[in-house]
Image (tube, rainbow, N blue to C red):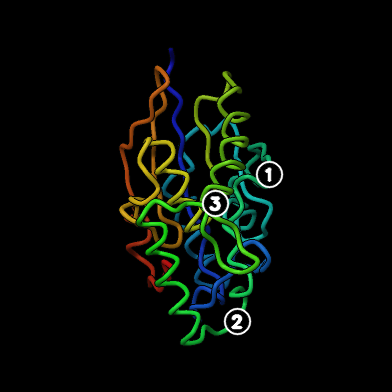
Amino acid sequence: MNAKHIYIIRHGETDFNKKGFVQGSSIDSNLNGLGKLQANAFFSKYNHIAFDKIYTSKLKRTHQTVQPFVASGIPIDTHYGLNEISWGEKEGRELTEQDEINYIKLLSEWNNGNYDYKLEGAESPQEVVKRQKEAFELILQQSDEKNILICTHGRAMKILISTLMDEPLCKMNQYEHSNLALYHIIYQNNRFRIVQANDIRHLNHITKKAHAY
């Protein structure tokens, strides 16, 4: 089977990232100035790759991140399955001391294998896995697409790569990320292999203020 090269990036920085606010799926924010610089830097480094298709979430910050590639004529599809995890009531505001207590409890539950645990009004990792699998099945069915670019979100990226690597979700935090970080994954013979992880070398020449919540 011919190899499929999958380039997965997190969106560029937004003002919510800069402030340390949680965005999740309900906050449809724009890239800020640094985020646009990051998007252009990634394009400058990787526009030599003949991407057959771009896949993004439904949120503007992912669309804006890949806009230079779209402007060059590469087709794009959007999928809700690639959206960020929903953080419920935490989204879009300054975090409180109680939020931090709730978050520590959340991580403890996930680390202990309770992947159905979630905050009030939020999504669980298991719910994210379900919709990501549906999106990825559609992506992998496109046998004529050999090089694809996927733009998604921080926590969604951790969950997605853990699933692709067949790792338990309690280990998802090993897959570090920052704004406009790249994971290059090769899919061949029904197996995924990481060849670049959290690569931000393309950002070396600009100021990095990425937030990796």
Q: Position of residue 101 (x, y in %)?
A: 43, 79
Name the amino acid, label 2.
Arg
Name the amino acid, label 3.
Thr
In front here: 208 or 177? 177
* Left or right placement of residue 51 versus residue 200 in this view: right
Q: Position of residue 134 (x, y in %)?
A: 62, 35
Along the polypeptide, which appears first: circle 1 or circle 2?
Answer: 1
In front here: 193 or 107? 107
* Left or right placement of residue 132 versus residue 5 in this view: right
In front here: 164 or 78? 164
Secondary structure found at label 2: loop
Q: Position of residue 168 (x, y in %)?
A: 37, 43
The numbered mark at residue 152 is: 3
According to the image, label 2 marks what residue?
Answer: 93
Q: Residue at x 50, y 30 (%)?
A: 147
Q: Residue at x 66, y 39 (%)?
A: 73
Along the polypeptide, which appears first: circle 3 or circle 2?
Answer: 2
According to the image, label 1 marks what residue?
Answer: 78
